[in-house]
Amino acid sequence: MIRVVIADDVKILRTGLKTVLSQDTGIEVVGEAGNGKDAVEMCIRMKPDVVLMDMRMPDFDGGYGTRKIKENLKDIKVLVLTTFDDKETVDKAVASGADGYILKEMDSDAIINSIKAVAGGINVFCENVFRSIRKEVTIPQEVGNFDITEREKDFLRLICDGCDNKEIASQLFLAEGTVRNGISRLLEKLKLKDRTQLAVFAIKNNII
C-alpha cells in the first residue's frame, strides 16, 4: 500500500484528489495539508511514501515543503502536482529536490501511475517539463568521449524506459547491487547528478 499526503491550499481540490486516489486499492491517502509547512509536519506524523505537492501555496509554498522534506525525511518521495509549468516554478521544484513534476491537467490514471512510479524510485516528469529540464541541464554531448560500455548503454536505455534498479537487474540478469553500483559509477564518469540527467544524456546521444 502506497501512503500519500496531499498538499494543496484548495480544499475542494484535495477532496477531489482523495476521491480519485481512493479508487485505487494500492493507494491510501493518509493526510492533507494546506501549505508547505503543514505538509512537513504531516509527514513527520504520518510517514507517508509520497507527497503530492502543489507549488504555489500561501505562507509556505511547495518549494519550502519539498526542500524540508528532502532534507529531513529522505525516504519520502515528493511528486509536484501543479497547474504551472513555467521555468521559474520548474527550476524551484527541481532545485528543492522534487522526485517528479506533473500537471493537474493530466487524467486520473496518469496521476495514479505517476504516484506508483515515484514510490518505486523512478523520477517522473511530464513531457513539457522534461523538455525544459533537458534544455537547461549541461550534459556531455558525445558518447565516444566517455568510453561508455555496452552494459552502461543497457543501463541508460532501461533508465529511459522508467525501470528501477530491481527491474533493470531482472532484465539484465544481474544482482540488484551490481546495477546500483554500475549506475553510481556511470553518474561519476559522466559527472551527472541523478537518473533524470542520465536519461537526458541518453536522449541527446541517441542511445534510445
Image (tube, helix red, strand yellow):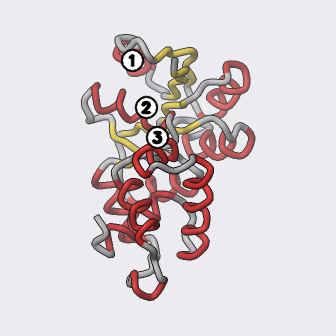
Write down the residue under mark 2.
115
- Viewed as shown, does residue 47 lie left or right of 92? right
Q: Determine crowd level at label 1: few under 14, some 14-19, many 20+ residues with C-alpha closer than 10 A.
A: many
| Amino acid on which the number 1 mark rests in the picture | Leu
CA–CA distance between discs 3 and 2?
Answer: 10 Å
Dot label at residue 21: 1
Query: Looking at the picture, how far across and down is residue 78, in whole percent?
Result: 54, 38
Residue depicted at x 38% and y 54%:
158
Evaluate whether residue 146 shows in this view. yes
Evaluate whether residue 100 shows in this view. no
Write down the residue under mark 3.
80
CA–CA distance between discs 1 and 2?
Answer: 10 Å
**CB contact under 8 Å: marks 1 and 2:** yes
Residue depicted at x 55% and y 35%:
58
Q: Find the residue positioned furthest to the bottom.
A: 145
| Amino acid on which the number 3 mark rests in the picture | Val
Dot 3 or dot 2: first in sequence order is 3
